[in-house]
Amino acid sequence: YIYFIFIYMKKYYDVIIFYSGASSSGANYQLANLIKDGILKSGVTVNDPINVYNFKSKNDKNALYLLDLIINSKAIILGTGDYNGNIEPPLLNFVDNYLKAGKSGLIDLSGIVAGMFVTSDDNNTGGQPILNSLARLVMTFGANIVSGGSWHISQGVVGVMNKDKEWTSPYLKENANNYGFRVGKIASFFNDNYIKVMHNSIVENFENIKNNNINSKCI
């Protein structure tokens, strides 16, 4: 008899994309996938973008799965639609309830990099202030923000979709691809180097403290 043993192994990714959007195929989904295409070109792995819009506030299995992916990633990219000039509430709820913003047990993301994107249906609604809010949000957890590398996507990607479901900028696809590529490339080396440098710094500081204590006792 030949027995086959199958061991289920959870799959993790280098970069995790998640967003909040009322539609599973709308502007946020489309922009997330344009960024994903750029990440794949950088040579790292990336998940299919996850929509947090319908997550429950407690013990949601999909939210817990996303949290596990984030903790084991090297980079995150989060996105939101324009909600009256603010981040959409479902994204904030996920951060508050699962990443524990402002609470004990806050998730430490200091070893990863973060990117962001915003969508809107009008240029006048102002995507940049929402990018600023997303930046402050991820910095709460110590994440290191990846800039866009050029003046027109300096902090992240803003996509404006008109009533005909078309992007108003002819450069959006290129910008989103380039941004994803940049995040992916930085993610490919940042985490390992961060851990190595920070570990060495902690050990060095510990040795200095120990030596200072010994010297103090000798005196």
Image (cartoon, rainbow, N blue to C red):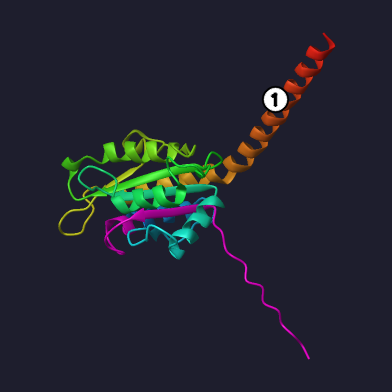
Quarter containing the N terminus:
bottom right
Q: Is residue 122 left or right of residue 89?
A: left
Q: Nearer the viewer, residue 194 or 204?
A: 204
Residue 10 in magenta? yes
Q: List the residue tagged with mark 1.
A: 205
Which stretch is magenta?
Answer: 1-30
* Residue 42: % across, % down: 51, 50
The residue at 54%/52% (across/down) is: 14
Among all residues in the image, which is located at the extreme right? 218
Q: From this viewpoint, is residue 110 visible?
A: yes
Q: Nearer the viewer, residue 102 or 82?
A: 102
- Mark 1 belongs to which amino acid? Asn
Q: State the image quarter where residue 56 is shown.
A: bottom left
Quarter containing the C terminus:
top right
Q: State the image quarter where residue 102 is shown.
A: top left
Q: Is residue 44 left or right of residue 89?
A: right
Residue 5 in magenta? yes
* Residue 164: % across, % down: 16, 59
Q: Is residue 49 above or below residue 133?
A: below
Main secondary-structure element of the magenta-colored stretch: loop
Mark 1 burial class by Cα count in 10 Å: few <14, some 14-19, many 20+ = few
* Residue 137: % across, % down: 39, 40
The residue at 61%/37% (across/down) is: 194
Q: Is residue 57 above or below residue 99?
A: below
* Residue 89: % across, % down: 29, 50
